Image (tube, rainbow, N blue to C red):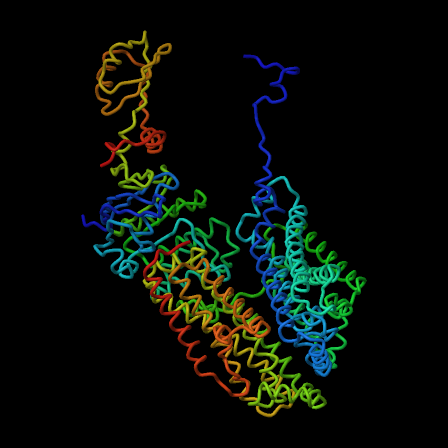
Amino acid sequence: MSSVIGGSPRATAPHATMIVRPSRLERIYGLGGVFGKTLRDSRGATIVVAGIAVVILVAAGAGIKAAYPTVLSRQELVQLAASTPAIFDGLVGRPVNVGTLGGFVAWKYGVVFPLLAGLWSILALSSTLASEVSRGSMEFVAAAPYRKRRIALQKLAGHITAMAIAMTIVAAGAWFAGKAFGDLPTDAIPLQAAVGYAVWLGLTSLLAGSIAWALAPFLGRGAAAGLAGAIMFGSYIVNGYQSAVPVFAAPAALSWFDWTAGHDPLAGLYDWASLIPVALLAVVLFAIGAGAFARRDLGAQSVVRLPGLPSALAGIREPTGRSFGQLLPSATGWGIGMGLFGLLISASSRSFADEIAKAPDILRMIKSVLPNFDVTSPGGFLTLVFMAYALVLAGFAAATFISGWAGEETSGRLETVLSTPASRGCWAVRSGIGVILAILLMTVMAAIGIAIGSVSAGGGDIATPIVGTFVLALYASAMAGIGFAVGGVFGVGRAATVVSAIVILTLLVDFIAPPLRLPDWIHQLALSAHMGQPMVGIWDWAGVAACLVLAIGGLALGAWGYGRRDIGR
Amino acid sequence: MTAVIQTDRLTKAYGSHRGIVEIDLDVREGEVFGFLGPNGAGKTTTIRILLDLIRPTSGRATVFGIRTDGDPVAIHRRVGYLPGEFSLYDRLTGGQNLQYFANLRGGVDRAFQAQLIARFDLDASRRFREYSKGNKQKVGLIVALQHRPELLILDEPTSGLDPLVQQTFLEVMREAVADGRTVFLSSHVLSEAEKTCDRVAIIRDGRLVRIDRVDALRDLAAHEVELRFTGPVPVEPFTALAGVSRVSAEDHVLRMHVTGSIDPVVKAAAAYSLTDFISREPSLEETFLAEYGREVVPEAGRE
């Protein structure tokens, strides 16, 4: 049959091809394009971040309603906050209109939200392109009819949209907390304040993420995330502690928390103009990151070529050393972070002691709650300021180590390892010991930071807080033990997620149990409630035993589980 | 010959998903045994059971007479394994990866390891993540070979290798077999199995459909025979012959398919004046496609 050109329907569709465009359902499901897929991949994190923030906001609202129900009690709260030494600005927030529900929430819990959302943004934006490159799917995406810049921008837009959704939920949560628990006329959180707070939180978090985004094409995702995290945390610390530690005043001028200090909408303060430089800087960094991804070779992640580890450190003799060697970079990163945090806090103990000497009421109040030790000693100050956060950080560190340990199986390496004469149980125990060694390394680095800080502060007893630091190793080992057990018995796919969830639940219990006046047994469920005050030499031996049981028992249970189940990929 | 691998009604089910169903295998010492089948047929599942990486739902498997779920470590001591898809330690160099797996086995002959590195032309000083797919495959092959195992279990061993390296691999494998070692090789590349294997098993949809020698399998398919006559083409004498089908004539050429022995055709052709006689032996690939490729294999086809 001869073909007819022109005029015939077959001329326009010679092969009767029918292109099926992505359906609306597919687009909603996240399979319509790069943007949708990124948004889909962000849904879990969006729910977690927004969920934690809303739970804390609501719990704090309920707490102030229960604890300070009258005008008189609010005045007492204001006086208490006003007499708090400036050093506490870093630990909590700046006390602005703390007599209102919004001001109280911003003061008491202001620390958590920007660090939490900022960490999410950093992790997401450092890895959104790099993880696709490393798993090879980016080759397919880049081979589709999209320019690389467009891929990068769609990825970015996906994360920004996820952040916007999370912040919308946060704004709704803040507004609801004011509506539901605001007994006094000043307690209502107007929509403008809720939105203003969410905009600030979203922008500062995105700025932290934009640093990671801009650095990732040059340094690789791990280094970019680590550096951006350090900058965010440092930015927060120098701003929070600048009034107590004079040397921080100069670098604080570079902190976006300092730039936006006048914008505290929950407390009734607005400085919209201060958000402009934050937004502009984020846009510039986004452009740098997108441009770098577009210009550089696909897969070229790092311009800094670090030398490989020597064999002695790489751990190529047996599974314990290999597991430790594999975790060495992340253990070192966590150790540096914890060490710097400990150094900063212990070095500030002298300033704290001087400050608190001027506030006898506060000292009396603290002594009534913590009668067993001198809070002006390095160990006392570390107990007050360092421990709660350090335990959370140690828990998250354990989750990342478990994730690395699990990677042995999920990557397929374990299949080759177990084809050697290494038995499953033996491998599980020995590689688990490698994880514990990584935790110990991190703890030793934290202890070194505390030792240097304590010495520089000229404090008295330095040995006790150094020994006390090892409670972090116990706590992290317990969390790792849970990960071993879950990974060994049920499969490693969710082990790190379970550990992270327990750390987050513990954090939430710590945060919401006191303001909600929940029964004490609920608070006692949190392992962190049984860690004692080891920085001043007070150990909770039941907690120590619980940690050891969880660590050793978890490892044994994991080894037993490994012996019974199929090895996955 | 002693059986190195034996499976008895080996079955693995993944919930409602099919894994393998009642696989009976018998791999003998010193042979190269090909395990063939299309993607998803169950080759890797079988191999992973042999190494006790997964456990059978029913049935049993032994390697060197040892139950796979009894003392897998004793089996692993004597086995070299290359997974079909694998990953090693990205941050270590190729050499460090090789050393680690050598150490897990209590050490290897360094000279032999170095010889393998040289033969496969591997730059062992580069980090694993920097290797191309083919170079990663070389590292995996050396991991499997470097301790001179009695049994090599290789899942798609030539995947990603260029033809020259494939040649090197085949040489190394032949040397291993000459040394009395056994090779269990899974592949979906039939030409590879055809070149290397003594016997092959064909698995499809989780069921074993045939085990036989390579040449016997090849006989399954029809030879393509072409006779070129000097005079008119005699069709009738050939169509009547046993095993002859698809007879066609064109000018002075007679073409036919012959199943089984070709002897009757040769004898019939001897009665005529011919200018040419061409008989093309089918490849294993053609056999496989003809026999199992496009239709459901009947139960009777099983051995």
Whether residue A215 is visible here, answered yes or no, is no
Whether residue A513 is visible here, answered yes or no, is yes
The residue at the point 40 percent across, 49 percent down is B84
Q: Picture quarter containing residue A95?
A: bottom right
Task: Look at the image and tell me in which quarter the C terminus of chain A lies.
Answer: bottom left
Q: Nearer the viewer, residue A26 or A526?
A: A526
Residue that protrudes farthest toward the top in the picture:
B232
Residue that protrudes farthest toward the right in the picture:
A273
The residue at the point 39 percent across, 68 percent down is A318
Horizontal and vertical percent position of residue A190: 74, 61
Residue B8 to residue B106: above or below: above
Horizontal and vertical percent position of residue B268: 23, 15
Horizontal and vertical percent position of residue A163: 65, 56
The residue at the point 39 percent across, 69 percent down is A555
Task: Look at the image and tell me in which quarter the N terminus of chain A lies.
Answer: top right
Residue B194 to residue A260: above or below: above
Q: Picture quarter containing residue A99?
A: bottom right
Residue that protrudes farthest toward the bottom in the picture:
A460
Q: How many labels does the image show?
A: 0
Residue A287 to residue A376: above or below: above
Q: Picture quarter containing residue B289?
A: top left
Q: Nearer the viewer, residue A10 or A36?
A: A36
Horizontal and vertical percent position of residue A62: 62, 69
